[in-house]
Amino acid sequence: MVTDERTAKARKELEDEHAEVMRSLGEVFVAVEAVKAAKPTDNIHDLLLELQKQVKKARDGGLVGSGANDHRRALKKYLALVPEPGA
């Protein structure tokens, strides 16, 4: 039997992981803007490499967090605890 406490805890974990991923997207947007602002004389290859690095960090996490991977696990855990709509 699933308790409200377990569901609430899973929801909090899901929301925390979501917030962490959203924060990491800030660096992705900065890198995208750098590519968009590139001039013909800028090294676009390196700008795209930095963008790739920031996307990987958002997806896989950095030294501390696990990025979107942790969010995916938290989502799976939460969805296993809540009933499907209409069920």
Image: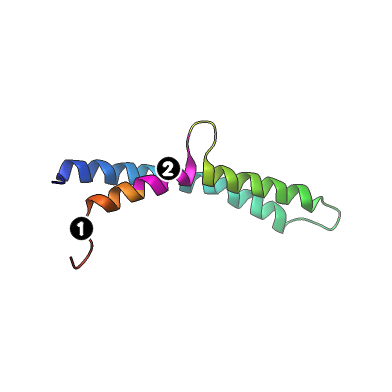
Q: Based on the picture, tell me whether residue 87 belongs to the magenta stretch.
A: no
Marking on residue 5:
none
Residue at (61% x, 45% y) in the render: 54
Visual colour scheme:
rainbow
Q: Is residue 72 visible?
A: yes
Q: Quadrant of residue 32?
A: bottom right
For the residues labelled 2 and 1, the Cα–Cα distance comes to: 22 Å
**Element class at badge 1:** loop
Residue at (34% x, 50% y) in the render: 76
- Residue 64: image location, x then y, percent: 49, 31
Q: 39 and 76: which one is in front?
A: 76
- Residue 70: image location, x then y, percent: 42, 42
- The answer to whether 51 appears left or right of 2 in the picture is right
Three-letter code for the amino acid on which mark 1 is drawn: Pro
Q: Main secondary structure of the magenta part?
A: helix
Q: Quadrant of residue 84?
A: bottom left
Q: Based on the picture, tell me whether residue 66 belongs to the magenta stretch.
A: yes
Residue designated by label 2: 70
Three-letter code for the amino acid on which mark 2 is drawn: Asp
Q: Which residues are magenta?
A: 65-74
Against 24, residue 44 (above or below) is below
Q: Is residue 18 visible?
A: no
- The answer to whether 15 appears left or right of 48 in the picture is left
- Residue 67: image location, x then y, percent: 48, 42
**Element class at badge 2:** helix
Residue at (70% x, 58% y) in the render: 36
- Nearer-N-terminus badge (2/1): 2
Marking on residue 83:
1
Give yes or no for contact between labels 2 and 1 (Cβ–Cβ under 8 Å).
no
